[in-house]
Every structure is written in C-alpha cells, then in structure tokens.
Image: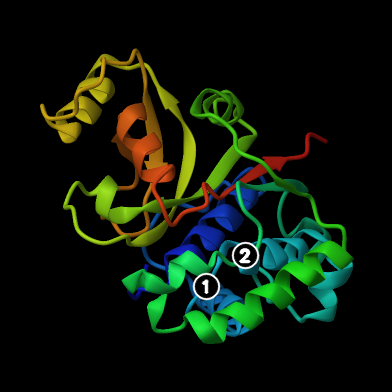
Amino acid sequence: QHDTWDCGVACTQMVLRWLRSSRYPQIDDSMTLTYDEMTERKWIIDACESRSIWTIDFVIILQRLFEKELRQSFDFPLNSSDQDDDDAWDEARYLYLSKRFGVDEAYKSYGYYRDAFERDQSRIKGRFALAKELNLPMCEAQIGLDLLVDVISRDECIAMVLIDNAVLKRMGGDYAGHYVLLVGISTDIEDVAQAEAYCGKEEDTPSASYCLIVKNPNWTECVSFIAPSLFEKAWKADGTDEDVVLIAKVKQ
C-alpha cells in the first residue's frame, strides 16, 4: 500500500500475484512492486476513475482482467513485454457478495464517506447499473464466517474483504474502511496463540481452534494471524455492507 486510500488497489495486485505464482514460481512476496506492477497499478487506478474506491469498482476491474478479450481492449499491461497474454495468469472466477447493493444514504454522515459521498453516489449507482447489464457474478446476500472460512480453506480460493480498520486495529473511533485478503486458516498452536494475544484479554469470546491468515496491505508483515472473533467483528461492522469478493483459480 502506497497511500491511505489505495488498499483495494494493493489487494487487487496481490490477487494478480497469486494468480501468476503457479506459472511463475520466481515471483516472490516482496512488498516492492516491479516495474510491470507499477504500470499495472497505474492502470488499475485509472480504471477506478476515483480515489474514493468502492467494492463494485474492483468487481468491474476483475471482470476486465479475467476476460481476455476485455483485457486486450483496455490495453492492460502484461507481466513482461515478451509474455504471451494467454499465459498472463491462471484462469480465475469470482463472486461478489454483499448484504446491500447500491449506496446507503446513512453513510453520508460517516466521516470516511462524507467528503466524496455526493460525487460517489451517482458514480456508484452507474457502476451497479453496468454490473447488472453485464450480468456479473454478484449476489445480494449475507454469509456467515463459517461459510467464508470453508471457502478460503481451499488452496485454490481466497477472498478480498472490506473491514473496519478501526475495529481490526482495536483503536476505536470512527469507521475506517479497509480492504484485506483472506488467504487461509492456520491450526498451528503458535499462530493461534499469536492471534489471541493480538485480540487482548478484553475480547470476551471463547478461544478458537484456528486463526485466519490475512494479507493486510497496511501492515509490514507478509501475513498476519487474526482471531476469527476479531475478524468477524471488523467485517460485520456498520459501513462495510459485509462486502466480500471470493476469488478462485480454475483447475486446468
């Protein structure tokens, strides 16, 4: 993450790295972007057409990226100049889930949304109208943490999740929207203990036998271990609409 507003852009690029990793084992988990990735970053930002980016923006971008014909028509940069576009990354599918499609008027009072709310309102309505016209894979529904964990426990699946960073960082205060990648679970005793220690004693919830493995573009660690109770609280917080984009590699 390079700025305060580009966590979703960083998550999108982490998704692309993940999709490339099986074809290009030399790709590492470095926090530093390659020249090609910097070019990709600019393309993604330009495609969003705003620095106030909503989940539907990333859904439309994923649609462009995952369809080869669309990728070519929008001049998406490849991993390298001599790389065949057919081999850019593994084929993938996605599903966008949210308890509410559209713009909730109540959010105009949230400091996180306030400055750009009026401008965003018409733009986001247009995005959802486009998504409906294109019949994108979306479902207006709430899912529980158990189902989300079941999905991302599979090697070929990850999830891009909108959470309240104020809750995740346990700092209190106003809603602070933030995107992270949920990439798996761990039952390792040390990982679970680390996750529970981060929660603190004030978390009045029973201990879990596992923790979530999270890639957070705002943190320096490659991955973080988060207790299910804390993650669920951050994901279900007011302001997130419980947005989640499930992404799966298609087995060849």
Label 1: which secondary element: loop
Which residue corresponds to the image point at 39% horizontal and 84% vertical from the top-left? 115
Residue at the image position 43 percent from the left and 57 percent from the top: 239
> Residue 41: percent from the left, percent from the top?
53, 75
Q: Which of 119 and 198 lies nearest the eye of the viewer?
A: 119
Name the quarter where the N terminus is drawn.
Answer: bottom left
Percent coordinates x, y for residue 59 in the rendering: 67, 61
Pointer 2 local density, CA inside 10 Å: few below 14, some 14–19, many at least 20: many
Give above or below for 211 relative to 183: above
The answer to whether one can see residue 83 in this image is no
Sort mark 1 into few (<14), some (14-19) or many (20+) by Cα contacts within 10 Å: some
Q: What's the amino acid at mark 1? A: Ile
The image shows a total of numbered marks equal to: 2
The three-letter amino acid code for the residue at tag 2 is Phe
Q: Is residue 40 above or below residue 30?
A: below
Question: x, y (%) of residue 140?
Answer: 70, 47
Give the quarter of the image for residue 173. bottom left
- Numbered badge on residue 44: none
Residue at (71% x, 73% y) in the render: 127
- Residue drawn where x is 78% and y is 48% of the image: 91
- Frontmost residue, 212 versus 141: 141
Kindly state the secondary structure of the residue where label 2 is placed: helix
Pick out the residue farthest to the left: 201
206 vs 34, left or right, is left
Q: Which badge, 2 or 1, comes first in the chain's sequence?
A: 1
x then y, percent, for residue 52? 48, 77
Q: Look at the numbered discs 2 and 1 and tell me whether their residues touch, using CB distance below 8 Å.
A: yes
Residue 95 visible in the snapshot: yes
Which numbered circle lies on residue 58? Answer: 2
Quarter of the figure with the C terminus:
top right
**Which numbered circle lies on residue 53?**
1
Res 179 → quadrant: bottom left
